[in-house]
């Protein structure tokens, strides 16, 4: 893999970068059980310096999802957050290059919203079990069975699926948007568990909707159990349990808070509690350890193998000389149709 010239920076520059990295990464482990220290930070400093220099030279912006490694988020990232926040940043970006450290559907979304930019990904294999669960053809077939339904796609879907949908949603606005749609019958793809959560929530609010869904699930959030929650509550009195709407309804019903990764971060930061159980991807715990080091997390998180394909070395390579497979390209007609469902989402999402 292409790598930066190790002599490109002076010893003083490397030491200053090492200090910056250590200050940012100190509260989070480098690998499980081993904290970041001077040596580890010094070993990545030439890479973070080279990436940050390349970004300036090439007018590139680096969007990072909260699930990627903290050295990417805090070492070289320009924007960090959940899918909704990052899609807004992509839409507003005037950068020549958008480098997306997340998964491919997020980078595709950036390309749909910023077609003038070159959008690149560190690893083209960074899929998503939800996005990969249904194709545009599959949705067309499903749609034909329910011609009167409004088709709502979760943003964790391919550009083809977005192009076949009436409106796109994220974990942060899904309830509000579906509640506001005039249609009673909703065809929701691709997350069956998120559909269950929305159905339950709208029923509790007295909103009458029929929600039909396809059968995808997230391989991270479909694995937590109520037994884990009960055991943790018994051991840690005062514990707060935090869940994502991609989880089964019995998990969200047993949690103290359910929301997008951005919502989960806001909840933890604003909630005084002795311990938190984060039923989500471990990267979010890393972000909270960095940004709110007084809080205590008792484990329980899971790794997303797709998010973990991102690395500093791949970020550098994608920026220095992207291979064709690292560049997102979309047919223009497909892009325009996919953009309609995303723009509808922005119209239906109240400004915060
Ligand atoms: P958020 O939009 O809540 O960050 O979710 C993205 C995701 O992939 C969760 O698994
Ligand atoms: Fe997809 Fe789940 Fe990974 Fe998010 S955590 S990218 S939904 S597989």
Image: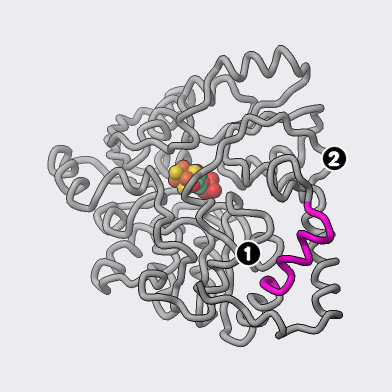
* Mark earlier in primary sequence (1, 2): 1
- Residue at (69, 79) in percent of width and height: 6
Q: Residue at x 59, y 53 (%)?
A: 68
Specify the label residue 19 is tagged with: none
Q: Residue at x 69, y 47 (%)?
A: 31
How many other residues sit within 10 Å of disc 2, few (<14), some (14-19) or many (≥20)? few
Nearest the eye: 346 or 325 = 325
Residue at screen point 49% across, 65% down:
122
Count the numbered circles shown: 2
Residue 184: image location, x then y, percent: 29, 35
Q: In which image quadrant can residue 59 be found?
A: bottom right
- Whether disc 2's CB lies below 8 Å from ligand 1 is answered no
Residue 325: give x, y in percent of width and height. 36, 70
On the image, the x and y values in percent for residue 342 come to 39, 59
Q: Is residue 133 left or right of residue 113?
A: left
The reply to whether residue 159 is visible in this rendering is yes
**Residue of label 1:** 79
* Quarter of the figure with residue 240: top right
Q: Is residue 32 above or below residue 275?
A: below
Residue holding disc 2: 294
The range drawn in magenta is 36-48
With 301 as the anchor, is 123 left or right in this view? left
Describe the element under mark 1 as helix, strand or loop.
strand
The correct choice, above or below, for 250 with respect to 216 in the image is above
Q: 146 or 66: nearer the eye?
A: 66
Task: Find numbered disc 2 in the image and state the secondary structure of the residue it sits on.
Answer: loop
The chief SS type of the magenta part is helix
Task: Estimate the spatial distance between the alpha carbons at disc 1 and disc 2, rounded to whole Å.
Answer: 24 Å
Out of 7 and 153, give the one closest to the viewer. Answer: 7
Residue 54: image location, x then y, percent: 61, 82
Q: Is residue 42 magenta?
A: yes
Q: Answer with the quarter of the image where residue 191 lies.
A: top left
């Amino acid at each position: 893999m292409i790598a930066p010239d190790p002599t490109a920076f002076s010893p003083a520059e490397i030491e200053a970068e090492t200090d910056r990295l250590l200050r940012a990464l100190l509260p989070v482990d480098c690998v499980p059980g081993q904290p970041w220290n001077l040596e580890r930070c010094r070993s990545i400093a030439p890479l973070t310096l080279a990436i940050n220099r390349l970004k300036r030279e090439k007018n590139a912006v680096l969007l990072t999802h909260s699930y990627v490694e903290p050295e990417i988020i805090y070492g070289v990232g320009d924007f960090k957050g959940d899918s909704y926040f990052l899609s807004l940043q992509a839409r507003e970006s005037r950068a020549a290059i958008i480098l997306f450290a997340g998964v491919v559907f997020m980078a595709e979304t950036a390309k749909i919203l910023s077609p003038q930019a070159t959008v690149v990904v560190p690893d083209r294999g960074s899929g998503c079990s939800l996005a990969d669960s249904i194709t545009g053809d599959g949705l067309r077939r499903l749609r034909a069975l329910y011609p009167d339904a409004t088709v709502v796609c979760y943003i964790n879907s391919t550009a083809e699926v977005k192009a076949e949908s009436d409106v796109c949603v994220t974990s942060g606005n899904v309830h509000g948007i579906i509640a506001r749609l005039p249609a009673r019958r909703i065809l929701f793809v691709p997350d069956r568990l998120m559909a269950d959560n929305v159905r339950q929530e709208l029923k509790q609010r007295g909103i009458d909707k029929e929600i039909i869904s396809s059968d995808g699930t997230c391989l991270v959030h479909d694995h937590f159990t109520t037994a884990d929650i009960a055991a943790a509550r018994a051991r840690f009195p005062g514990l707060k349990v935090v869940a994502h709407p991609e989880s089964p309804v019995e998990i969200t019903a047993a949690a103290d808070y359910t929301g997008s990764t951005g919502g989960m971060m806001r909840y933890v930061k604003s909630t005084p509690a002795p311990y938190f159980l984060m039923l989500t991807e471990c990267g979010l715990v890393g972000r909270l350890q960095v940004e709110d080091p007084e809080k205590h997390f008792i484990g329980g998180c899971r790794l997303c193998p797709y998010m973990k394909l991102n690395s500093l070395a791949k970020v550098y390579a994608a920026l220095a000389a992207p291979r064709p497979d690292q560049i997102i390209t979309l047919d223009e007609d497909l892009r325009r149709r996919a953009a309609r469902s995303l723009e509808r989402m922005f119209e239906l999402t109240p400004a915060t």
